[in-house]
Image: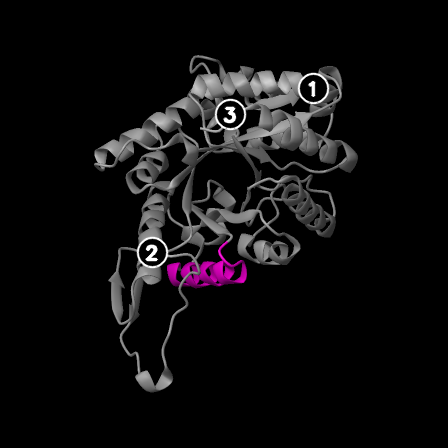
Amino acid sequence: MKLGVFMMPLHPPDKDRTQCFEEDIELIVHADELGFTEAWIGQHCTLAWEPIPSNDVFIANVLPRTKNIRLGSGVTLIPHHHPANVALRLALLDHLSRGRINCAFGQSGVPTDWELFDLPDPKTQGLMTLEGIDMVLRIWESEAPFDLKGDYWHIKVENTNPDLEFGMLKPYQKPHPPIAMSVVKGSSMAARMAGERGYIPISTNLVAGNTVKEHWQTYCSGAEEAGCSQPDREIWRVARSIFIGETSSEAWDYALNSPFADSFTYMLTLLRSADMVHLVKRDPELPDSDVTTEYLLRESCIVGDKNECMLQISKLWDETGGFGTLLMVAHDMDDKPKWRQSMAWLANEVVPSFPSL
């Protein structure tokens, strides 16, 4: 099993923004030093808890501070951007990193983001995302002149005057960086599409293990429908909020009485506002009123001492059938020594106890 980071990020709204970004950078640098293989950086524009509006700019800052860790947009919100701009900016990052870039694409689930960019309904945004991904790939893989006509964008370059030495930047990695899609729903369209195309599936940290298991089943169904061979589970990333303490009692005391718990209260509020609480239930018949912050912590987090966390990861591994990379969700480092120690135990003692697929 490999180990990575998924950084939404998560910070209390009243915390100084500059301090938040500096701590996020510090966390990824520390992850690189500990041998984490990858980090995915989120993007939102109107959420105080998740204050990175431009993950490519953040990645550009982190690149020269790290040596080995791969850095990914997690995700690039396609409906917020023109596909040509996405293609060119990510190609530039790929060159600056000499091929350490991953690219995850998706759409925002935040109504205030939709309003900010005057976006249509979520279903239409999903169609925009699919079209945008296809256009990014066409730009990366083909040469002008081209005329890409879609329902939402029209990208055309006809005049490639040789006297001007026309050229659009292509990625460093050939034919392009690895592509991923974030998966939330069990029978997710994103999981099915990722399976059809061989993209990396990233299972969200918020859902129960039985839903995570369904992600892989949907991914494999997509691959089968596309006539692809059986996917290798090594490609699968599963995200989880993880905190390891000296004792399980100490770990749970911290988890329940810190920004760690506050972040789940925030995420639950976000889910309720979007009428999506059903997505995080292990039992669909569970009343919405029973889905509390503590329910989310107990159901979807890995918290305890080293041995307890090994048992919880083993349980997740057995329930899902195994996966290639465990992604530790980055939380606010309100207590740096505790978080640095937790990451060290995770990297040096807990994850190495699990086999590679």
* Other-residue count near label 1 (Cα within 10 Å), few / some / many at <14 / 14–19 / ≥20: many
* Other-residue count near label 3 (Cα within 10 Å), few / some / many at <14 / 14–19 / ≥20: few
Give how far across and how far down residue 46 sits, in percent: 56, 47
Give the SS element for disc 3: loop
Asked if residue 243 can be seen in this view, the reply is: yes
Give how far across and how far down residue 178 sits, in percent: 41, 48
* Amino acid type, mark 1: Asp
What residue did someone put label 2 on?
137
Magenta stretch in the rendered image? 83-99
Tag of residue 305: 1
Q: Is residue 150 left or right of residue 83?
A: left
Q: Residue at x 49, y 41 (%)?
A: 110
Asked if residue 262 can be seen in this view, the reply is: no
What residue did someone put label 3 on?
355
Give how far across and how far down residue 339 sits, in percent: 72, 34
Q: Is residue 94 magenta?
A: yes
Distance, label 2 to label 3, CA atoms, is 34 Å
Q: Residue at x 51, y 52 (%)?
A: 100
* Other-residue count near label 2 (Cα within 10 Å), few / some / many at <14 / 14–19 / ≥20: some
